[in-house]
Amino acid sequence: MNSGARMRHSTGFTLIEVLAALVIVALGMLGVIEAVSQTASNSSYLRDKTLAHWIAMNQMTTVRLAPQPPKLDKSSDQVEMAGRHWRWTMNVVKTPVDSVRRIDITVRPEDANEKSSLASLTGFYGTALAQPGTTIVLWQGDLQSSAGAGNGDDKEDDNKKEQPPPKTPPTPPPTPPPTVEPDPGEPTVPPIGPTPEPTE
């Protein structure tokens, strides 16, 4: 009986083995939980970044559709989207072309640091004009510099139009074929055909 009780007592896990198994399972679960948390955090970041980019594009479209060009200064305002408050900042600066302005827009959450930005967008505002009948685009800033050249070309075209067409010289009359006089030394050949009868 003692041997049978000893055999039944030896079958099973000890407390140390159970604790070691629990530690291994806990470590594995921590890795899985961290991976899921990282995925959720990335999804939240991508969602916020997408919303911020939409806000920047909406503001850029609003500026481009305005009847007047944007002022050369820095402005900021608050907007609400997807149940959250956002703040956009727009900076308008000059470019080498007078009629074109560069627009830089940054968007961040309302409670974020002022120097941080979740999305940024750069665009341009300007108008271009082309002379009728040409494919060369002239920006408004270049109209004054090219006005003299354009007027000169117009004057040359007008002068060309005013000039009369060149006169064509008269066609000379056709030259008659040269007549060959018979040689007096050669006999005269009578004409072929019936001889006309003398008239009384």
Image (tube, grey):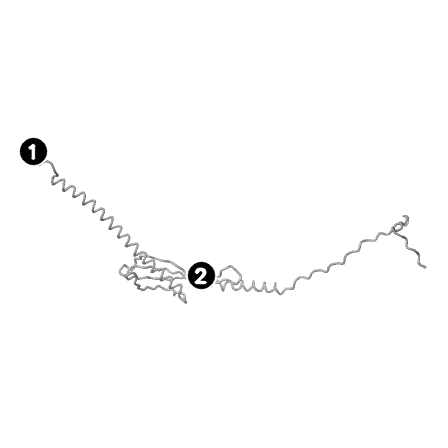
The answer to whether 30 is drawn above or below residue 146 in the figure is above
Measured as percent of width and height from the top left, residue 184 is found at: 90, 50
Residue 165 pos. (x, y %):
65, 62
Binning the other alpha carbons within 10 Å of mark 1 as few (below 14), some (14 to 19) or many (20 upward) gives few
What is the three-letter code of the residue carrying label 2?
Val
The amino acid type of the residue labelled 1 equals Gly
Q: Quadrant of residue 13?
A: top left
The residue that mark 2 highlights is 97
Left or right position of 143 against 82: right
Between residues 110 and 187, which one lies in front from this camera angle?
187
Residue that badge 1 annotates: 4
Point out residue 148 in the picture as x, y percentages from the top left corner: 53, 64
- The residue sitting at the bottom extreme is 67
Q: Quadrant of the N terminus?
A: top left
Sequence-wise, which precedes: disc 1 or disc 2?
1
Disc 1 secondary structure class: helix
Query: Residue 79 appears at what percent x and percent y?
Result: 31, 63
Q: Residue at x 7, y 33 (%)?
A: 4
Residue located 44% across and 61% down the image: 97
| Left or right for 117, reference 182 | left
Hey, which residue is sitting farthest left in the picture? 1
Q: Residues within 10 Å of mark 2 (few under 14, many from 20)?
A: few
